[in-house]
Image (tube, rainbow, N blue to C red):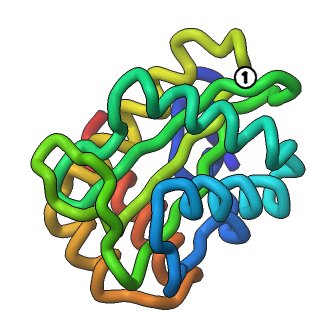
Amino acid sequence: MGAEKGQMDLSTLLKPAAVKVLANTTSKKRLFQDLADIAHSAYGLDATQTIDALQERETLGPTGVGHGVALPHARLHGLTDVVGVFLKLEKPLDFDAVDRLPVDLVFALFAPKDSGVEHLKALALVSRTLRNTETCTKLRANSDPAALHAVLTAAQGTQAA
């Protein structure tokens, strides 16, 4: 991957194994459990620590940013890089989003405890990608995790930073 240091890229943040389509997520609590399980299998993160960190962040204010998109994020001990998990929910979930719309696209970010600006850059990148209506339309039209990963990693190449 020819990404220079400082050059943030969705393909480096998001492993194909961390992209899933979920049919039966019925609560935010269940969603965080699913995110933690996937983060554990894709990146080896501690599931319990991940759930706690996500819930703790959520108490500061909901991470549902509107238009059916949520960007839960947390800082964790023991991580060296910012990593992501993307979920598409077949049944939109009530997420206390700013516009009160249920959420069906979830991009979770996990960053090292002391990541500072890298974490913010990653969040800005994901936020920018998922603010693109065309990208969200493509994501909602696909249910194949490999296709979703391709849409996400391609989307960002077409937008100037």
Helix, strand or loop at disc 1? strand
Q: Position of residue 151 (x, y in %)?
A: 41, 71
Outermost left residue: 99
Question: As rendered, which of 159 and 2 lies closer to the eye?
Answer: 159
Question: As rendered, which of 27 and 122 lies closer to the eye?
Answer: 27
Above or below, 69 against 109 in this view is below
Tell me which residue sits at (82%, 22%) in the image. Answer: 77
The quarter of the picture where the C terminus appears is top left
Q: Position of residue 129 (x, y in %)?
A: 31, 50
Task: Identify residue type, mark 1.
Answer: Pro
Tell me which residue sits at (59%, 53%) in the image. Answer: 32
Mark 1, residue position: 112
* Side of 50 relative to 105 (left or right): right
Residue density around tag 1, few if under 14, some if 14–19, many if 20 or more, within 10 Å: some
* Side of 99 relative to 125 (left or right): left
Q: Position of residue 115 (x, y in %)?
A: 65, 15
Tell me which residue sits at (72%, 70%) in the image. Answer: 17
Question: As rendered, which of 104 and 145 lies closer to the eye?
Answer: 104
Total numbered circles: 1
* Side of 7 relative to 81 (left or right): left
Q: Position of residue 6 (x, y in %)?
A: 57, 22
Tell me which residue sits at (37%, 52%) in the image. Answer: 156
